[in-house]
Image (spheres, rainbow, N blue to C red):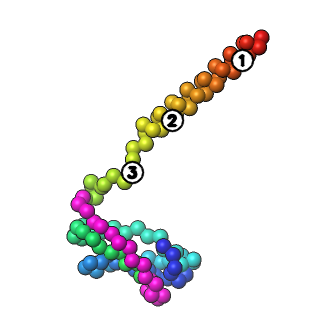
Amino acid sequence: MTGFSPNENVTITAHSTPIVLGTFQADANGVIDATVTLPSGLELGSHQLIVAGVSSGHTVTLPMTLTSGTASTLASTGTDLSKPIYLMVQSLLTGFGLLFLAARRRRLLAD
């Protein structure tokens, strides 16, 4: 997240009921890169993360929806790519094999 003063302290707060999640320091370019942990008591539903520069007053509001689940049962955020990758590798190997056989056949016919 950008737009903060160089080396500025930035506070991240979860809102509907304000809960300070941490204070972090922006880098020399005014960029903040932070990871926060949401408290287990935070109610399900719509919330906002407010990222506010302490000295500049620059504020960024990030909407967030908290759904059911716990840290031990995190929602899936991706797709299992093992089958498509396997098929891609098989296709490449088949293609290289066919190219090899075609080149060998050309050489045999040329002789």
The numbered mark at residue 106 is 1
Q: CA distance from mark 2 to mark 3?
A: 19 Å
Q: CA distance from mark 1 to mark 2?
A: 27 Å
| Relative height, residue 15 to residue 95 (above, below) | below
How packed mark 1 is, by other alpha carbons closer than 10 Å (few <14, some 14-19, many 20 or more), is few
Q: CA distance from mark 3 to mark 1?
A: 46 Å
Viewer-proximal residue among 9 and 14: 14
Residue that label 3 marks: 78
Residue for point 25% across, 79% down: 17
Across and down, in percent, residue 79 comes to 39, 47
Q: Is residue 54 magenta?
A: yes
Viewer-proximal residue among 82 and 22: 82
**First in sequence: mark 1 or mark 2?**
2
Q: Quadrant of residue 72?
A: bottom left
Q: Quadrant of residue 101?
A: top right
Across and down, in percent, residue 70 comes to 25, 59
Dot 1: element: helix
Dot 3: element: loop
Let me know if residue 11 appears in the view: yes
Q: Which residues are magenta?
A: 53-69
Residue that label 2 marks: 88
Viewer-proximal residue among 102 and 19: 102
Residue for point 56% across, 32% down: 92
Q: At label 2, which amino acid type do we have?
A: Met
Viewer-proximal residue among 15 and 63: 63
Q: At label 3, which amino acid type do we have?
A: Gly
Q: At label 1, which amino acid type do we have?
A: Arg
